[in-house]
Amino acid sequence: MEIEKLNLYRDTNWNDIKLRFCGHSECLPLHSYGPGTRPYYLMHFVLSGKGRLVVNKTEYQITENQLFLVEPDQMVFYQADKEDPWTYSWVGFNGKLAPYFMHRLGFGYPSLTKELSTEIFEEIKDLLDILISIKNNNTKNDLYTNGILLLLLSKVGTFIEDSKELPERKSRQNSESHVQRAISIIEDFYGRDLTVQYIADKLGLNRSYLSEIFSKQMGVPLKKYILDFRITQSEEFLFTSDWSVDYISQICGFNSPSYFSKIFKEYHGISPTEYRKSRHKREHQTVLVK
């Protein structure tokens, strides 16, 4: 049984950098997330065990005392090891200055991982314990938790003195392979009536050829990848919003709420409503399992 502790923070008016939530997970063997995207930065600190992170076609093997970063709107897949599954704590944050600070700390695809000294990692673990346990129910705690976030990030790495402007994202049309361009289309249009034929037409490719190269590179048929991505996004909305199941099914590209519930139950064994209740129940647990 997977053990998870979550702590969601109330929204504030601070827009520079903002702590959204944090958590701690003892993962089961081969427990995975994705393929999917997050709308915020999500930094994981691996306390024990190991696993892998896949971004684009780059695979990272990650072990104890390492961290890995999920960037906003970046398609990712990560999975716990079969024999030695990882336990990690994580923080989610965003804000208009978050990209600037991540750049100054040396992060940005393909530099998404970092190994920390045992001493620094122990200090970070203490800060994570505070963030996971404290409740943001007043202004004093709002200030305190955001301050802890900044202190934690300061310990992640040394600032780069030679500051450079953030590079603009190059056109996906020119820089990515056919498969990566297909994934980009899925990210942008998964809420519509998206089909393999539509993607092939957008790329100017033969449908069979696209399906063949996608399955070869990604290890899963394109049609299933679209469905996997939709389900993953629906999980995110069920957890982080109070939107109705009907609305979530609509924005995730399902033809009807009943079909969405049927497919979701095939993936998770429970309905979307039960999944939401289960995730929120974990949020209110009071004992942090270490």
Image (cartoon, rainbow, N blue to C red):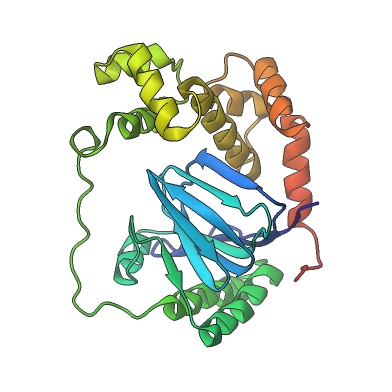
* Res 268 visible: yes
Residue 94: where, in percent of width, then height?
A: 44, 58
- Relative placement, left or right, of 31 versus 206 is right
User: How many numbered marks are there?
Assistant: 0
**Camera-side residue of 14 and 82:** 82
Indicate left or right for 77 with 23 as reference.
Answer: left
Whether 276 is drawn above or below 198: the answer is: below
User: Which residue is located at x 51 percent, y 39 percent?
Assistant: 35
> Which residue is at the far bottom?
119
Q: Image quadrant for the C terminus?
A: bottom right
Residue 246 placed where, x, y %? 64, 23
Up the image or down, 89 lies above or below 214; here it is below
Tell which of 114 and 286 is nearer to you: 114
Relative to the observer, which residue lies in front, 21 or 175? 175
Residue at x-position 49% and y-position 23%? 221
Name the spot of residue 125 as percent of width and height, x first: 61, 77
Name above or below for residue 221 compared with residue 256: below
Along the horizontal axis of the image, is 278 left or right of 39? right
Query: In this rendering, would 74 be left or right of 9?
Result: left
Q: Looking at the rendering, which quadrant does residue 96 occupy?
A: bottom left
Q: Position of residue 202 (x, y in %)?
A: 28, 18
Residue under the point 60% across and 58% down? 10
> Which residue is rendered at x = 35% and y = 61% of the image?
111
Q: Quadrant of residue 239?
A: top right
Q: Looking at the image, can residue 186 be seen?
A: no
Query: Could you say which is closer to the camera, residue 263 or residue 95?
Result: 263
